[in-house]
Amino acid sequence: MTPGINMEFCRCEDLSFAAGVERAAGIGYRVIEPMVHNGRELLSEAGYFHSVSMDEDPYDVLDICEKYGVVCSGLSAHTPLMRPEIAVPYLEKAIRFAKVLGAPVVNTDEGIRPPWLDDTEIWYAMQYTLKKVLHVAERYGISIGIEPHQSLSKTTEGLLRIATLVESPMLKVNYDTGNAFLGGEDPYDGLAAVASRVIHMHAKDISIQHAEAEKGKVTGTPVGCACGDGVIDWKRVVGILKGAGFDGVLSVECGTPAQAVRSLAHLNEVLAHA
């Protein structure tokens, strides 16, 4: 297992993707998880936001990664699976982008539920999206990682149901310990239940104050605190993953570069004694 960093860590400093990659490499990370978006938006274009437009040439993005000696563990490409008109072209584009970057997985979730779909229709909509997208994913050898992050996937039962809507070797799980905890699940039981399907991990810790304020009230959170500073037992998490044969990336999702520094030190210590 290897620690990595989700590029959200530099959002608080209004850094561009290239500046964020340089920052991550300077801290000591050799694996990053970029966030991608469609089209053009002001903050990224002006260099104040780390997200990368998929209208860019992916080889230009790869050049930046190679310049600073990092590789990509996956792409953060969240889009509403329950809305095929949005999700299908978005994820297909992300798959092609990921292939160039050498990122083995595109991470997503079901998104906010559209009010016009009933309790039965939501599953058919997601199944259609995944079936169409996985046809492309299988051709490119890129997995789709379903993350616990919304009203359905916040539970282990819901996460597993989404992750088994289509029979495909490329339909996997991107487990997020922090989201599972805040959603009201036991993150260790939840991880154990999906461990055989996990291809990528979001190493998200939750501070005690954050836990007291939001546990059971939200379906997730953009970033957590530094790994080791919060409620998540990383030795236990690594033990579960190791028992399942996982040897992938623990992609840290924290809110500041200082937290990224402490997370890397803590995870390296845990992994050294695993």
Image (spheres, grey):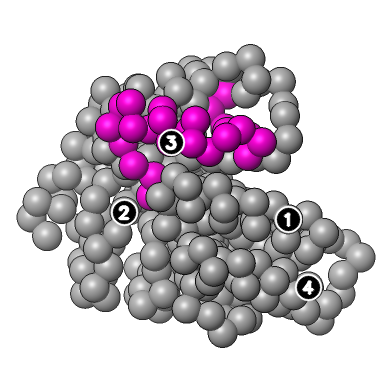
| Circle number at residue 19 | none
Residue type beneath disc 2: Val
> Which type of secondary structure does the marked residue at label 1 adopt?
helix
Residue 98 rendering spot, x and y as whole percentages:
50, 50
Q: Earlier in the sequence, mark 2 or mark 4?
A: 4
**Magenta region: which residues?**
49-73
Q: Is residue 82 visible?
A: yes
Q: Which residue is mark 1?
A: 89
Local crowd size for mark 1, using a 10 Å CA cut-off: few (<14), some (14–19), many (≥20): some
Q: Earlier in the sequence, mark 3 or mark 1?
A: 3
Local crowd size for mark 2, using a 10 Å CA cut-off: few (<14), some (14–19), many (≥20): many
> Which type of secondary structure does the marked residue at label 4 adopt?
helix
Q: Which residue is mark 2?
A: 249
Q: CA distance from mark 2 to mark 1?
A: 27 Å
Task: Please name the residue shown 41% across and 28% down the image.
Answer: 64
29 lies left or right of 190 = left
Q: Which residue is mark 3?
A: 62
Q: Earlier in the sequence, mark 3 or mark 4?
A: 3
Q: Earlier in the sequence, mark 4 or mark 1?
A: 1
| Circle number at residue 125 | 4
